[in-house]
Image: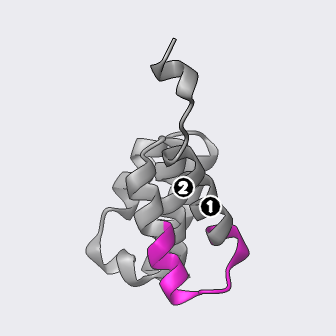
C-alpha cells in the first residue's frame, strides 16, 4: 500500500465508525482531489453530513472521471431530488 491508499483506508475506517469529521480531516489534502476513490468517499461523507452542495460537487467531479458509474449517478439524482423538493402545503397552509 502506498501513502495515499493508507490515508483513504484510514478515512474509510473512520466513516465505518461514523467519525465523519475525522474522515474528512484525513482526506483534506489537495493531492487527494485527483484520486478517484478519495473524491467518491468525500462525496459519501458530505452526503451523510447532509451537505448537499458539497456532496453533489464531489460526485459530479467523480462522474467527470468515470461518466458511466451508476452509484455516483444515483447519488447525484438523489441529491437533486432533495434539493428540488417542493411541497406546496408547507408554504400555503
What residue is shown with label 2? Answer: 80
Q: Quadrant of the N terminus?
A: bottom right
Q: Kindly identify the residue that appears in the image at 57 percent across and 49 percent down.
A: 15
Q: Kindly identify the residue that appears in the image at 59 percent across and 50 percent down.
A: 81
Foreground residue among 10 and 70: 70
Q: Is residue 63 above or below residue 54?
A: below
Provide the residue span drawn in magenta. Answer: 59-72
Judge left or right: residue 90 versus residue 75.
left
10 Å neighbourhood of mark 2: few (<14), some, or many (≥20)?
A: some
Tell me the number on the disc at residue 77: 1
Residue 43 percent across, percent down from the top left: 50, 61
Queried whether the magenta region covers residue 56, the answer comes back as no
Circles 1, 2 touching at the beta carbon (< 8 Å): yes
Residue 7 percent across, percent down from the top left: 46, 67
Q: Is residue 6 visible?
A: no
Magenta region, main secondary structure: helix
Residue 64 percent across, percent down from the top left: 49, 85
Amino acid at each position: 500500500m502506498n501513502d495515499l491508499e493508507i490515508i483513504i483506508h484510514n478515512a474509510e475506517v473512520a466513516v465505518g465508525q461514523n467519525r465523519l469529521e475525522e474522515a474528512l480531516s484525513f482526506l483534506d489534502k489537495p493531492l487527494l482531489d485527483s484520486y478517484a476513490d478519495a473524491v467518491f468517499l468525500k462525496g459519501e461523507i458530505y452526503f451523510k453530513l447532509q451537505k448537499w452542495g458539497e456532496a453533489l460537487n464531489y460526485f459530479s467531479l467523480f462522474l467527470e472521471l468515470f461518466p458511466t458509474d451508476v452509484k455516483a449517478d444515483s447519488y447525484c439524482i438523489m441529491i437533486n431530488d432533495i434539493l428540488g423538493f417542493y411541497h406546496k402545503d408547507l408554504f400555503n397552509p
